[in-house]
Amino acid sequence: SGPALALAGPTGSGKTHLAHVFTARSGALLLAPGDLTVAAVGDRLGAARAVALDRAETADEEALLHLYNLLAERRGHLLVVARQPPARWGIALADLRSRLLTAPVALIAPPDEGLLSAVLVKLFADRQIQVGEEVVAYLLARFERSFAAAQSAVVALDQAALAARRRVTIPLVRAVLGEESPEE
């Protein structure tokens, strides 16, 4: 197998955070697809032997192949971060496809109820909002089971609570979800 590891998972699942942890612990470069062109790969890489490429599925295929090959020559490491594993990218360049399909894939699955509940509590805490267990349970029963939906719900509830100058409660959640008026 080659120097690559693919990290795939839904939006908001922490992939970019994990890429940052990888770069901090390994001294790797963190690149975005816009940073990667065939002409710039060598300059971008410098003497580095490890790279994390966020949103890798949108990168220029030739540039990604060149990056892969340079890191393989250096016996380095490439972390490709994407929403889907490379097998689902529809890679046109045969050489790149063959290399990335041999890479192990670490898949972050959509959250179960327990994890999503903990994520909601953390997202509220990050915004310094205290909510009761009943608010979290009420929310869990009413929105899509995804990290992105949890983030969107917390942002909307924070904005509504600030605008109304009130706490996040079930009546406020109902109002934000369009289920009833915001009076308590």
Image: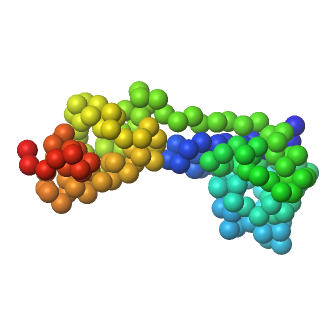
Q: Quadrant of residue 162?
A: bottom left
Q: In this view, does 6 lie above or below 57?
A: above
Q: Position of residue 27 (x, y in %)?
A: 69, 51
Q: Where is residue 78 in the image (x, y as percent from the top left)?
A: 76, 48
In the shown orientation, is residue 79 left or right of residue 13?
Answer: right
| Quadrant the N terminus occupies | top right
Query: At x 84% / y 49%, what residue is drawn?
Result: 97
Q: Position of residue 133 (x, y in %)?
A: 25, 30
Query: At x 86% / y 46%, what residue is drawn?
Result: 99
Its colouring scheme is rainbow
Looking at the image, which is closer to me, 108 or 93? Answer: 93
Looking at the image, which is closer to me, 108 or 42? Answer: 108
Q: Is residue 60 above or below residue 97?
A: below
Query: At x 78% / y 69%, what residue is drawn?
Result: 37
**Outermost residue toward the front?**
179
In the shown orientation, is residue 149 left or right of residue 89?
Answer: left
Q: Position of residue 50 (x, y in %)?
A: 76, 50
In the shown orientation, is residue 22 left or right of residue 46?
Answer: left
Query: At x 80% / y 40%, what residue is drawn?
Result: 103
| Quadrant the C terminus occupies | top left
In the shown orientation, is residue 77 left or right of residue 95?
Answer: left
The reply to whether residue 16 is in sight is yes
